[in-house]
Image (spheres, coloured by chain):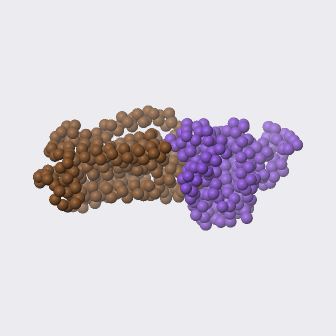
Amino acid sequence: MNTLQIKHIKLVRANRQLLDVSNLATHSGELIAILGPNGAGKSSLLKVISGEWHAQAADILIHGRSRQQWARNQLAGHLGVLPQSSSLNFPFTVEEVVLMGAIPLALSRQEARIKAQQLMQTTDTSQFADRLYTSLSGGERQRVQLARVLLQLSQAQSAPVLLLDEPLSAQDLSQQHQLMSLMQQLAHQQQATILVVLHDLNHALRYADRIWLMNSGHLCADGAPSDILQPDKIAELWGYRPQLLTGEHHSAVLY
Amino acid sequence: MIQNKKILAGLLACLVIIIASISSLISGPMAIPAVQSLLAVLDLISGGQLNSLNAHQTIVVQELRLPRTLLALFLGALLAVCGAVTQGVFRNPLADPGVIGVSSGAGLGAALAIVVFPTSLAFISTPLAAFVGGLLTTLLVYRLAQSSEGTSVLILLLAGIAISAFTGAVVGFLSFIANDQALRDLTLWGMGSLSGANFRHVALTGISCIILLFFYMKHASALNALLLGEAEAHHLGIDVERVKLRLILLTAAGIGIAVSMAGMIGFIGLVVPHLIRLTLGPDHRYLLPLSALTGAALLLIADIVARQVLAPAELPVGLLTALIGAPFFAALLLQQRRRLSLI
């Protein structure tokens, strides 16, 4: 069964059509990178899928069920969103923030703590478990939020869906690669479906199984990274023609 | 470890409440020994003949000091939890119902009820009108200050100034047109004092305090999630709009009742949750009950001091809490200044 099935989405805001997409489906174990120039509708797409924004039409099935057919807590256990940034302004410790991922779950306090500690290891945040979240840098905060979202999805009965909106912007080079390989691992080993909005085409080439290319609210290509990220296509969308380097294991875009 | 710290803090607050209650029962112009005062209370509870006090002393304890003590405790708890929840819903540690104008709105409602419907139903009509006034102001302030980034502190505070100025003018106008009896009631009420406490006040405040705390506790996790951000709370499976509406309604009711009982008693809702967050963290599952206990202790102590400072005359307790609270608020502003410019 498809993890996500987007039959039709149409989003109009302030008399501007932001999104008009139809007939998209994802499978479990897939890491999909969403690419496109600014204003293409990448973030809007994630916001409509997550239910944060109401669209004029949003015919979306999650594991074959529409949003209304899910209990709120159950849906939260299967569909997670990593926010771009958080406006948390209260002095919670890092561990407390991670544990908030257990709010929709039926875990005992002790179970939740053990799971949280594991996930802080995974996201490389356990060294500041007792520090205040507000004292962390942007990149550290994002990894804490990731641990929280992973806890939220940790009890999913069928393949969870994780949405990430530009998760790499506050991370340095090695952290970017760590995060992307963690996402790849989650997809390939734990059969999660991951939708990630990226700016760096090279990350997409290297880690994604599939690319959704968007432009002015439409999906203009859906396929394997090496098929889609061709110089002609890139020039058409971004107005800049890069060079493509093809290596033995993976290729890279030079710009 | 941290768990123990929270339990310890709760026990400490309970201890302070017990000591303060005893000293509240024995302090006043009429000297009544401690043991006798307690016996008078037990006498009231058991309906028996435990009491060795004379009739005057019994009346003083049972009908003046006991209701006043209980009212101070429940009112302090009510104000503190309403403050904590307001800060949670607005996602802002400076959002006190008094500072952002909600209490003024409730005050205007109460004043209208006192002057326009000076009926024998005042017992119900005043809290009800205060509730409506508080609710309308909360919704107004919320509409004004809300954005996707949270709430703007600047707009919150400016809205508070505007609303207080407006309600001040209307209350002034009301006292101008009021008849003698209404004017007397209005003035007495406006001083923010617990001196008129009776058992009807205690019952209404106590019941609403317990009901409010019960519902707030049911939403404690949702409040924590709300602090992450509204979108994040939504993704955690929380029906954000519904939870917010419920909490706003409950808080308006709490503030309405508090204001109609004892006028403006400011800053308890700001100082108490802040102190708890500072020492034990912002987790609402602990913040709410501990704020209730600490708020109860603080208002009772403030009331005892207010009764003693100028004895036999007494200071309105609202004056005293403002005297402590306003500098505290200024210090908090100073401390938060850097962060404020970001919102």
Identified at 67% across, 49% down, the residue is A164
**Percent x, y of residue A203:** 76, 43
Q: Chain B takes which shade in the image?
A: brown
Q: Position of residue B240 (x, y in %)?
A: 52, 56
- Left or right: residue B131 versus residue B218 is left
Of the pair A76 and B132, the residue shown nearer to us: A76
Please say whether residue B169 is visible from this viewpoint.
no
- Asked whether residue B207 appears in the rendered view, the answer is yes
Whole-percent x, y for residue B159 in the image? 41, 44
Who's the residue at 50% across and 57% down the image? B241
Residue B59, placed above or below residue A123:
below
Q: Where in the figure is residue B272, as x and y percent of width and height?
A: 38, 43
Q: For residue B114, which quarter of the picture?
A: bottom left
Residue nearer the viewer, B225 or B64:
B64
Q: How many marks?
A: 0
Q: Residue at x 15, y 44 (%)?
A: B31
Q: Residue at x 39, y 56 (%)?
A: B212
Q: Is residue B120 left or right of residue A195?
A: left
Task: Examine the image and state in which quarter residue A48 appears.
Answer: bottom right
Left or right: residue B285 versus residue B179 is: right
Q: Nearer the viewer, residue B169 or A233?
A: A233
Colour chain A is painted in: purple
